[in-house]
Image (tube, helix red, strand yellow):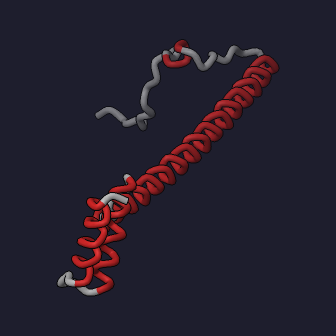
Amino acid sequence: MSRFTNGLLVGLGVSLLFAPRTGQEMRSLLAERFRYVRGIPPENVELKQQVQHMGQRVQEVQQQANRAAEMGSTVQDYAQQTASSVSSVQSDLKHVAQQAGTDVPSTGSSAATPTQPLQPNRPNRPRL
């Protein structure tokens, strides 16, 4: 080794011996600096907590999205069942109407306009 490298190592050793820190502090400082030299960023407790919080938040949003998807499929199933029931009832009504000899309007736009205007039921009052 060169004299420079030897001097560097001796200086490092002497500085460690006379450092105003406890052994645990010095070891953690050396480990952190060694990780930094190797390219590993130093530990940041606050950053770790934020990452954990964001991970929990992502899981919560994912669970909410799953519940919404389940509810959407349930609503879609109910809507399909209702449409099927309406079609079945309409078919039954048409069949009954054909047997009775009358015509039943379909559930399209013509069903919204009655053939005769409806008048409210009013009791017959005697005129004075």
- Quadrant showing the C terminus: top left
Q: Position of residue 85 (x, y in %)?
A: 70, 34
Q: Residue at x 26, y 65 (%)?
A: 8
In the rendering, at what x and y percent does residue 22 appear?
A: 26, 87
In x, y percent, where is residue 75?
A: 58, 41
Q: Is residue 67 above or below residue 115?
A: below
Residue that sits furthest to the left in the current view: 20
x 54%, y 12%: residue: 110
126 vs 91, nearest the viewer: 91
What residue is rendered at 65% in x and 33% in y?
80
For residue 104, above or below residue 8? above
Q: Residue at x 43, y 60 (%)?
A: 56
Left or right of 17: which side holds 123?
right
Q: In the rendered picture of this protein, how many numbered marks are placed on residues? A: 0
11 sits to left or right of 27:
left
Q: Nearer the viewer, residue 23 or 63?
A: 23
Residue 125 vs 32, above or below: the answer is above
Which image quarter: residue 121? top left
Please tell me in which quadrant of the rendered image residue 94 appears.
top right
Residue closest to the eye, 116 or 122: 116
Tell me: residue 14, above or below residue 98: below
- Taking the view exactly as shown, the residue that stands out farthest to the bottom is 22
Residue 90 position in % (x across, y down)? 70, 25
- The quarter in which the N terminus is drawn is bottom left
Depth check: give the residue in front, 80 or 86. Answer: 80
